[in-house]
Image (cartoon, grey):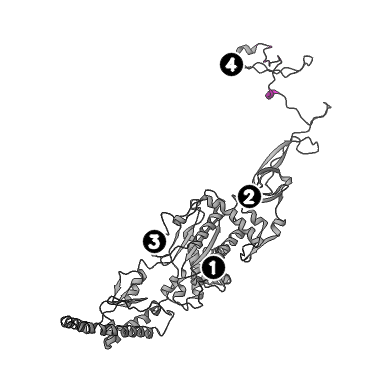
Amino acid sequence: NIGSIINGASANNQQPKYEVICLLDSSDEEDGDTRKDDNGKDMVDASQQVPMDINATANSSSNPLPLIVLPDPPQMPLYDDDFVLTPFGPGKILSARVERYASTDNHSDATVFKPTIIYSIDLHFGICHIPARQVKPISPSSYTEKTLLTYQRVPLTGQDLLRLRPLTYLNDSIVNFYLKYLKSQHDLNNKGKTLTEDRSWDCLDGEGVHVFPSFCYTRIKNIMGGSRNSKMVRTKIWKDLKSWTKGTDLFKKQLLVFPINEHLHWTCVFVCHPGRLVRRHAKDLRGRTLNAVSLEGKSKGSDASQSIANPNTIISNNRKESASDSTAVPDDMATKSLDGDKNIQKDILQAKGNVASESQPQNNGTANNESQNANENSATDNASSKTSKAAPATRWRCDFCVEAQFNDYDKTVEHEKICEKNVDWCMIHFDSGKHFKLHKTTEIIGNIRKYLNAYYEAEYASSHPGLSSFTTKNMPGFTASVLQQDNTKDCGVYMLENAERMLQSTPLVDSNFVKTKGLNKQRFFGSNGYNKDDIEKKRDDMLQLIQTLHRGENGIEK
């Protein structure tokens, strides 16, 4: 169906005709067989036309300028996700492209095409395509130089607020601000709980929260530099970072929060009850063994002690219970001042004397009642005389399980060191992008353990000896099973949501929690979990919070 195509020259023009012959149809070889349009005119194939120079002058004798096409710009002056200023307000660059337009400028080197950069910019109320000449960097401007709010020494600017737009990577200022706000809310909700200044047994159980700045872990990793966990490296870590914990006793805190920012990805690590591990290894074992031996010696020579140290008596490291009566030594008596209390033997002996004196009136009352029946009297006297003549059998029970009982205190202590239930502290890594494989849990938790070792050696080694170091065995760590993100921009929002859930509803950390890795109904937060709708709403909530703080409403402390 393709006929001969004529160039469109007039009948008076003697230029040669251009023909295209179709080899599939022999009839096309005939002259004058051309395609006609609806008006009967010859159809012209544009592909066979001679290109015309748009810059050619009217004078046909002059030669046209040579065809020069400029290459693309070597690099874009601005990049994706950069914030810029446009005539329509601030926005975020989504993409950039190079477009070419015909140019009629004879003085230009590009006589046919001229490259132009076009940016696709998200203006929050819509997306527009703006030439590069109308786009300016956001810095320097009032968005970067003017501080809108300073919250606990964390400044926030207009550019920081732009980070709260959807699908935008959060920066350090937003993360540090919101973590400090969560800590202040946690302290406000637990305002009645005050911590003492000493480091006794109960004080190391842990209360309160300490939040590290986002660049703390980066600093720890840079100091380590891939070197081994040596004494010199730990000393350097402590010297460089001790000002960050000035006036704060980390091992008296319930939770330590480490935000992690590496490879454009946000995660966080929670250290739960680190003081419990220090307390566990700081027991005065030798002194308590001597006390147990001296108590057994006293019980042999004292009738009052013989009435207490019966074969049914079980002594725990933290308490003393008797199966024959409900009288027991108080917990605080047995756990008081484990940092080298020299009066512990006296306290336990005094407690035993009090128990003996309380049991005596009960025995007298029983004797008066038994005088009413002669047969029962004689049987009871015989049984009691046999019991008093028997050697006292003191048994020590493990603090963490009820199955293990020993006659020797040292054996009990050795069992406690390997008892499976003796773990009520741990480290939890919250990573909403595990499928990205950007953060290695073992590496991150290992570096934080090295920092805890440095802190222990500088602050606690002299007063609480016994702990060699924080290791994978005595300080377990795991990755929490939390909701995973489906993009690369919301990692910071997920991390802050996980931190908020932990601080608002802190789980009970015990041996079962550590064994199950905090799983509750196959999810870490159980029924108190969140979904993707909460993540989308989180950005607006944080923006409204900043605006409220900026106005000074609701009496929120800045």
Q: Earlier in the sequence, mark 4 or mark 2?
A: 4
Measured in 3D between alpha carbons, the distance from the residue under mark 2 to the one under mark 3, in whole angstroms, is 42 Å
Tell me if residue 41 is in the magenta stretch.
Answer: yes
- Kindly indicate whether the residue at mark 3 contacts the one at mark 2 (C-beta within 8 angstroms): no
Which tag, 4 or 1, sits closer to the chain's start? 4
Tags 4 and 2 touching, CB below 8 Å: no
Disc number for residue 24:
4
Of mark 4 and mark 3, the one earlier in the sequence is: 4
Q: Which residues fall within the magenta stretch?
A: 30-51
Q: Quadrant of residue 28?
A: top right
Q: Amino acid at mark 2?
A: Asp
Q: Which is more toward the observer, 506 or 37?
A: 506
Kind of residue at disc 3: Lys
Select label 4 or label 3 by which is in front.
Answer: 3
Of the two numbered discs 2 and 1 in the rendering, the one whose residue sits closer to the viewer: 1
Up-down relation of residue 477 to residue 84 (above or below): below
Q: Label 2 vs label 1: CA separation?
A: 36 Å
Give the SS element for disc 2: loop
Membership of 208 in magenta stretch: no
In the picture of the structure, the residue carrying the numbered disc 3 is 515
The residue at the point 24 percent across, 82 percent down is: 366
**Which residue is tagged 2?**
81
Residue at mark 3 to residue at mark 1: CA–CA distance: 29 Å
Callout in the foreground (3, 1): 1
Disc number for residue 187 = 1
